[in-house]
Each structure stands twice: as structure tokens, then as C-alpha cells.
Image (spheres, helix red, strand yellow):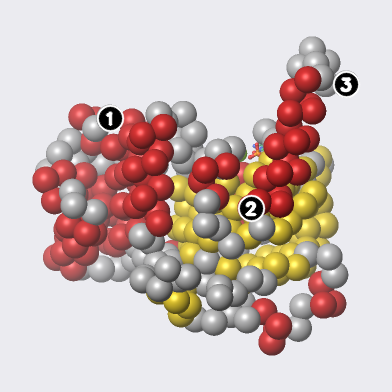
Amino acid sequence: MRDRTLQHDNPSHWPKDDMTPKAERARSGGQAARTAVEIVLDHAGYAIEGKPVLRDLSFAVAVDRLGVVGRNGSGKSTLARLVAGLIAPGEGSCRVNGLDLARDRKSAPREVGILFQNPDHQLIFPTVLEEMMFGLRQRGQSRSDAEAGARRVLANFGKDHWTDASVVSLSQGQKHLLCLMAVVAMAPRLLILDEPFAGLDAPTRTQLRRYLDLYDGAVLHISHDPADFAGYDAMFWLDQGQIRASGTPETVLAGYTKEMTRLGAEDDISDLAG
Ligand SMILES: Nc1ncnc2c1ncn2[C@@H]1O[C@H](COP(=O)(O)OP(=O)(O)O)[C@@H](O)[C@H]1O
Ligand SMILES: [Mg+2]
């Protein structure tokens, strides 16, 4: 049986011992061992220009595959940035594996890696190898170690032949895979995906999902595609900066899909913001 720990109602019910943060856990399939990550938010809030974007968020999870859904503007990307430590909560706290990553920037690259929606915002180097080496060099690896590490990941993904390819020559799906490989090369304990595969065609999404499935760290995946959450441990539905529902993908997605269908029948697109 796989562990599932997901509570968000009452922070006083989160004694550390109940978090079941088992380091290595066998997959139900019995093949690769994945490492669970602990994410604990305690009354976390975040406002942008005085407008609350995340409101009094409290939850504690210890899972290796966590999904997040929610409408546009519900605060998903802000939550991703908060968990990655790119922003600090205005109120309350956010900890990943017990660390406050907004303060502890030194630990951040080892703990979290984040993949954004647009690979063009992430890719800055002319060749695949240089792109892959960059993060490793940033972490203080020598040129030769970084190159060896980058080549190892390319080989693991069966993409040795990409090594000297120019980044601009890659297709959109290939650029996404390059971003994924560059983040994987850093081997973060938690990989945060902020709708990275939205806008890709179905076969490319399926292929990338297969690569993701092999990742032995934890994954927090924000997506609008229910298929992305197959086999996931737990999910949140974020609504106006708060958790509207949490639980298994089956239950959360059933409620979410029903609500989205209901809203789709309405016409709030014609309403102007007041
Ligand atoms: N840089 C920003 N300036 C002003 N408002 C922002 C900014 N970033 C996000 N917001 C607002 O915060 C809310 C949540 O945004 P976001 O976290 O990006 O939601 P999601 O990823 O779910 O679409 C939205 O109402 C958005 O307009
Ligand atoms: Mg977003």
C-alpha cells in the first residue's frame, strides 16, 4: 500500500509524527522507489498590490505525486512560487522538508526545481549541452563535472544525439523536454510543474508524462488535464486562493469537473471587473 497523508482542516492536527515522511517508498508497481516530500503550509497568505491571492492556506502533505487544479487566477502559480521559495508568505509559513526556502536560498536548488509554462522563458543558451550544464555550474560544479552530469541525464533520456543541437532548432515539445531534462539534471527532491505541457499536442504530452513518471523525486503538478494526474497520491482544488477540496484525484476531479461544466453553461465572460 502507498502512504497517503493529506490534511488541511486543522493545523493543530498535524503532529510531525503523523506526517509519515518515509524517505524511500516502493511504488505500488514495485519498480522504482520514489522519495516523498513534506510540504507544510500554516495559515499562509500572500497578497499582490494589496489584493489577497492566497488566503489562510493550511495543509500538510507527505506525498510523491501531488496535483493542483483550479480556474485561471485561482492562485496556482502563486502557490507554485511560494512552495519553490521564490516568494515568501506575507502571513503564516511555508516549509518544504522542514525548510523555509524563501529564507534558505542555499538549500533551495537541492530541494526544488520549477518548470514554467513557456520554455522560451527558461532557455537561455545556444546549445542543449550548455543549457543542461548551466544549473549544475550554478551549483558550484566544475566544468567537467557539470558536463559529465549533463551528458548522463541526456543519455538516461535517450537523447545523447541532442548534445550539440542548437536550442532554436528544437520543436516546442523538444524544448519542453529540454527544460525538463535541465531541471532533472539538478535532481531536486521536489519538481514543481506549472502547467508546462498546456498547449502541446496530445502525443507530445503523453510522451512527456512518461518521462515524468520515471522521475524518482516528488512532483507537484499544476494542470488542467485530468490525464496528468493518473496514479497521483493526492490533489488540491484551489479556488480564489483557498483550498476548495482535497483528496484523491478521482474525488477531487469529479467535483471540479462538475463545477467547471456548470460554470461553462453560465456567461460570466461578458461581465467586466467592477
Ligand atoms: N504580477 C502580478 N501583478 C498583479 N496581479 C497578479 C500578478 N500575478 C498574479 N496576479 C493576480 O493574482 C491572482 C492569482 O494569479 P495566479 O497565481 O497566476 O493564478 P493561476 O496560476 O491560478 O492562474 C490573479 O488574480 C492574478 O491576476
Ligand atoms: Mg498559473
In this rendering, position of residue 198 left or right of residue 146: right
Quadrant where the N terminus is found in the figure: bottom right
Position above or below: 116 against 106: above
Quadrant where the C terminus is found in the figure: top right
| Front position in the image: 230 or 101 | 230
In this rendering, position of residue 77 left or right of residue 58: left
Amino acid type at circle 2 is Pro
Amino acid type at circle 3 is Gly
Mark 2 falls on what kind of element?
Answer: helix
First in sequence: mark 1 or mark 2? Answer: 1
Residue denoted by label 1: 171
Query: Which residue extends farthest right?
Result: 274
Q: Which mark is residue 274?
A: 3
Do the CB atoms of the residues marked 1 and 3 lie less than 8 Å apart? no
Q: What is the x, y in percent for residue 190?
A: 49, 63
Q: How far apart are marks 3 and 2 (CA)?
A: 35 Å
Quadrant in which ligand 1 is drawn:
top right
Amino acid type at circle 1 is Ser
Residue denoted by label 2: 249
Please report the residue visible at 40 percent of the width from the left and 38 percent of the height from the top: 205
